[in-house]
Image: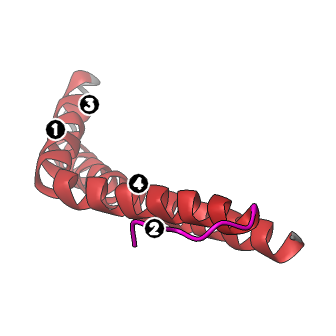
Amino acid sequence: MEQFLLDMSRDAMMTILKVSVPVLLAGMIVGLAVSIFQATTQIQEQSLHFVPKIIAMLVALLILGAWMLTVMKEFTLRVFDGMLKFIGMQCFWM
C-alpha cells in the first residue's frame, strides 16, 4: 500500500512537471530576453515586461495544448486504473 501511494505521488509530480515546464520555460525565456533588451536600451517601462511574456505563454499553450491534454488524460486513466487495482478489481478499458 505504501509503495502504491509513493508511485502515485511520484507519477502526479512528474505529470505536473511535464505539463507546466514548457509554458513556464517559454515565459522565462521571453522574460529574460525582454530584461536584456531593457537593460541594453535603458528603457524602464514596467508594462513592457508583462505583455510579451503573456503572449509567449498563450502561444505555448496554443501549440502544446493538445499534448498537455493527452498527458493529463493518460495520468487520469492511470489513477483510475490504480484505484481499481487498489480495491481489487481489474481495469476493463485498457
Disc 4 vs disc 3: which is toward the camera?
Answer: 4
Residue 40 drawn at (x, y percent)? 20, 51
The quarter holding residue 84 reads bottom right
Label 1 SS:
helix
Residue, disc 1: 52
Residue 85 lies, in percent from the top left, at 67, 69
Quadrant showing the N terminus? bottom right
Nearer to the camera, 43 or 59: 59
Dot 3 corresponds to which residue? Answer: 50
Name the disc covering residue 92, or none: 2
What residue is pinned by disc 4?
20
Q: Are marks 1 and 3 in contact (CB under 8 Å)?
A: yes
What residue do we see at 25% from left, 34% from top? 49
Q: Is residue 71 magenta?
A: no
Q: Which residues are magenta?
A: 87-94
* Image-based side of 59 in relation to 31, left or right: left
Residue type of the residue flagged with mark 3: Phe
Q: Residue at x 55, y 65 (%)?
A: 81
Instruction: From this view, report whether residue 25 is shown above or below residue 65.
Output: below
What is the CA distance from the residue labelled 1 to the residue labelled 3?
6 Å
